[in-house]
Amino acid sequence: MPIAARHRTFLILQGPLSPLYARLADALEGAGSTVHRINLCFGDWLHWRRPGAVAYRGRVRDWPDFVDRFMADNGITDLILHGDRRIYHRLAADCARRRSIRVIATELGYLRPDWMTIERDATSTGSHFPDDPDAIRAIAEKVPEPDLTPIYRGSFFKVAFPDVVYNLSNVLFTPLWPHYRRHTIYHPVPEYLAWIARLTGEKRRNREAGDVVERLKRSAIPFFVFPMQLEGDFQIRDHSPFDGMADALRPVIASFAANASEEAHLLIKGHPLDNGLENWPKTIGAIVSAYDLDDRIHYLDGGRLDEMLPFATGMVTVNSTAGIEALMHGCPTKTLTPAIYDIEGLTDRRELYDFWSAPEPPDEELLAAFIRALTGTVQVRGSIYNDDGLKAAVENMAERILSRRLNMPDAYVDPPPRLDRARALGAPL
């Protein structure tokens, strides 16, 4: 590792539900850096289990003063966190910026499933990744061509088990951290009970969704896809103007009813990790009942996007990373709020009512440059749901951090280029 890696002092907050951050700390310390950790709940302690941690058991309102003093007392140079809109992370990042401390934000990859996101300062709408096509093309010329072949097979056990242990342990050990505020919107117990019920009907739901798609394909009926996002997703809560997915569905369905051709259908695709606590068939049915759509809107509580997108007329999304998948299938894509891929020439930047009648496909050359620039600057190869993928993620993140190559080369635009547009739409950023 470079000499510059030494004498840096990192503060690590909550990571993904994985050993990723603990192993990343090992790599940083092995390169000569100092690592500190603040555990915010019992689940954090379970995922750390290494020296260099303190516990914060206070209230959210007292957290900014605590973390600000901690940064000052320990000479913190870098703050690392996963999910930069979590309340503790957002407040800590604000303190760090005031002290000119580098903020390093991670997330699951914009590209799935074999990639992780690591950016300087913030992700998503707050990302500093450029949205100018010429700047993206210039970056693409400076970074290597990525290999997008999936190599890390995901494990349902590695998704579900850490989640259950983390959240239920926080419930059981609430007296040890009585003031902890979780970033999820559902209590873990009813959510897991709902999940058990859903698992029993998964095959049936996939079969029913597949039947609808196959019927439309056989009949050559044009159809659009709207992928649902999770109700508690910060992409909806913070990065969009919508109060929830129902709030996003209303204008989409109204616009479809008024502007789409009478032959077109709309497939509302349920999120694969939806817990079933929201009664989407009832909610969607109530919205659709105001329009004479002759059974042209379908809620699919199952199925696979990659079996729909090659045949879809277009996709409409709030800001889901599924939009990148759609673009890679050559599917015209319209976002309702600025996503990382909402770039002139990639997405359809016209009004939604124009999209239904003549959706514009992405520019293939620009798309290739975008993927290349993205993987070369703010993505690293790896996965938290596979042992080999986890090892790769740790190595690649550590190298990116220690070499000071976050958002390099030239993928840092200040201020964040999507932020003003999102705020103008009403996103609470």
Image (cartoon, helix red, strand yellow):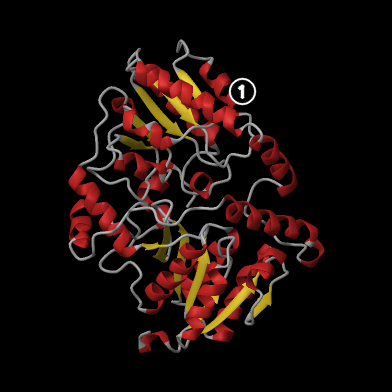
Q: Is residue 134 left or right of residue 84?
A: left
Relative height, residue 127 to residue 258 (above, below): below
Name the residue type under label 1.
Lys
Indicate the position of residue 90 as horizontal and vertical percent values. Answer: 53, 62
Instruction: Using the image as rendered, state which of residue 315 and residue 126 is in the foreground.
Output: 315
Relative height, residue 58 to residue 351 (above, below): below
Q: Is residue 132 visible?
A: no
Instruction: Using the image as rendered, state which of residue 2 and residue 207 is in the foreground.
Output: 207
Q: Is residue 304 left or right of residue 376?
A: right
Give the residue number, with chain letter if any, for mark 1: 282
Q: Is residue 161 left or right of residue 84?
A: right
Which image quadrant is residue 265 in? top left
Q: Is residue 7 visible?
A: yes
Relative height, residue 158 to residue 41 (above, below): above
Q: Secondary structure at mark 1?
A: helix
Indicate the position of residue 69 as horizontal and vertical percent values. Answer: 60, 79
Which residue does the image show at 57% across and 85% down from the upper left?
74
Which residue does the image show at 73% across and 59% down from the upper left?
170
Of the 4 image quadrants, the one containing the N terminus is: bottom left
Count of picture labels = 1
